[in-house]
Amino acid sequence: MSLRLPLRGDKFATIISAYAPPMTSSDAVKDKFYEDLNALLVTVSKTDKLIVLGDFNAHVGRDHAAWQGLLGLHCHGSYNDNGLLLLRTCAEHRLLLTNTFFHLPTREKAT
């Protein structure tokens, strides 16, 4: 689901809400989700402020050096297949995982 909102002047914000399939889903289902998400992301104007919200059922690991600029210092655990799909999508579309840039208690880092 996406929504394009007017801001001041000729500026816009596009908000995308997504729910990724859980790890127990088949690779085909997960691949289809990311294909659809990528297809939606490429339609967003480069001048829009883009906000992607969602439950990506992903663990992105701690390798902030490898994913510099999109993964912050406040990560936990190792990555899983969904995490790698999410990281690749973020890298391709120059998105960052904002919750990894802030210190949160461990119980609040994942749901």
Image (spheres, rainbow, N blue to C red):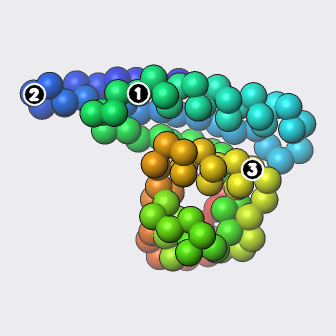
**Disc 3 and disc 2: Cα gap in Å?**
38 Å
Amino acid at pointer 3: Asn
Q: Is residue 43 left or right of residue 28?
A: left
Percent coordinates x, y for residue 1 in the rendering: 53, 24
The residue under label 3 is 82
Position of 64 with respect to 98 (left or right) is right
Say if residue 81 shows up in the picture: yes
In front: 19, or 44?
44
Precedes in sequence: disc 3 or disc 2: 2
Front-most of 106 and 11?
A: 11
- For the point 63% across and 73% down, the residue is 63
Residues at discs 3 and 1 in contact (Cβ within 8 Å): no
Give whichever of discs 2 and 1 has the lower sequence position. 2
Residue 27 placement (x, y as % from top left): 86, 38
- Badge number at residue 9: 2
Which label number is shown at residue 44?
Answer: 1
SS class, disc 2: loop
Q: Are marks 2 and 1 in contact (CB under 8 Å)?
A: no
Place residue 111 in its image quadrant.
bottom right
- Residue 13, located in which quarter of the rendered image? top left
Instruction: Report x, y in % for residue 29.
Output: 82, 31
Give residue 21's position: percent from left, percent from top. Answer: 76, 38
Give left or right: position of 37 versus 12: right
Q: Residue at x 44, y 71 (%)?
A: 102
Q: Nearer the viewer, mark 2 or mark 1?
A: 1
Helix, strand or loop at label 3? It is helix
